[in-house]
Amino acid sequence: MYKNLLVATDGSKLSDKAVAHAIGLARAVGATITAFYAAPDYPMPAYADGIVYEPVSRKEYAKLAAQDADKILSKVVAKAKAAGVACKTAFEIANTPWEAILTAAKRNKVDAIVMASHGPRGLSAVLLGSETQKVLTHTKLPVLVVR
């Protein structure tokens, strides 16, 4: 049925539930998982009185994002290993996480996507539409949404 599942995670408690479901499903059907993290896009520089203020360079931001991704994804790998499920990881710095999730799903040739019902964005997710809703709208793959 499923051979490779993509589980999207941001390290939150709710996405940890999605990870647990993905690992359980993968173990039950003998699938592998690909844990994916979409890091927020590089913050726009601030302009004040003709001076450009960049808190960190793009190169430094990419390094920090990779460290965050490693921290989040290594927990998924450890949980999968403990359950006897093969797991690989991927991450991308993305302005639109839902597109990054779909790109990762295609790149890794997954059969289904597992993700949380909503992220930590609160009111902005209600106003702009959730990443989960956008994934559901734009993919033909089965999507397991975890609440």
Image (spheres, rainbow, N blue to C red):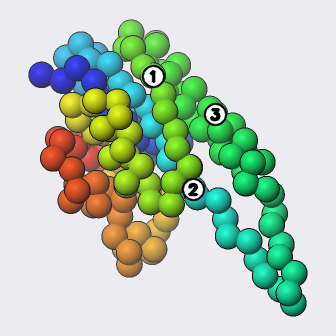
Q: Earlier in the sequence, mark 1 or mark 3?
A: 3
User: Crowding at label 3, few (<14), some or many (≥20) Cα neighbours within 10 Å?
Assistant: few
In the image, residue 85 lies at what x, y percent? 37, 14
Q: Quadrant of the N terminus?
A: top left
Residue 125: which quarter of the image? Answer: bottom left
Per the image, label 3 sits on a secondary structure element best described as: helix
Q: Please report whichever mark, 2 or 3, sits nearer to the chain's N-terminal start.
A: 2
Amino acid type of disc 1?
Lys
Furthest toward the bottom, the residue is 49
Q: Which residue is mark 1?
A: 88
Which three-letter amino acid code belongs to the residue tagged 3?
Answer: Lys
Tell how many labels. Answer: 3
The residue identified by callout 2 is 40
In this rendering, does residue 26 appear at all?
no
Residue type, numbered disc 2: Pro
The crowding category of the residue bearing disc 2, from other C-alpha atoms within 10 Å (few below 14, some 14 to 19, many at least 20), is few
Front-most of residues 54 and 119: 54
Quadrant position of residue 34: top left
Residue 57 spot, x, y in % from top left: 79, 56
User: CA separation, marks 1 and 2?
Assistant: 21 Å
Q: Identify the residue at horizontal 37%, vertical 55% (top origin).
A: 98
Which circle, 1 or 3, is nearer the viewer? Answer: 1
In the rendered structure, the answer to whether residue 50 lies left or right of residue 91 reads right
Q: Residue 71 has which mark?
A: 3
On the rendered structure, is 18 left or right of 123?
left
Give the Cα separation between the discs numbered 1 and 3.
14 Å
Q: Earlier in the sequence, mark 1 or mark 2?
A: 2
Q: Is residue 25 visible?
A: yes
Q: Residue at coordinates 39% horizontally, 14% vertically from top-left? A: 86
* Observer-nearest of 140 and 79: 140
> Do the residues bearing badges 1 and 2 touch, measured as CB atoms within 8 Å?
no
Which dot, 2 or 3, sits closer to the camera? 2
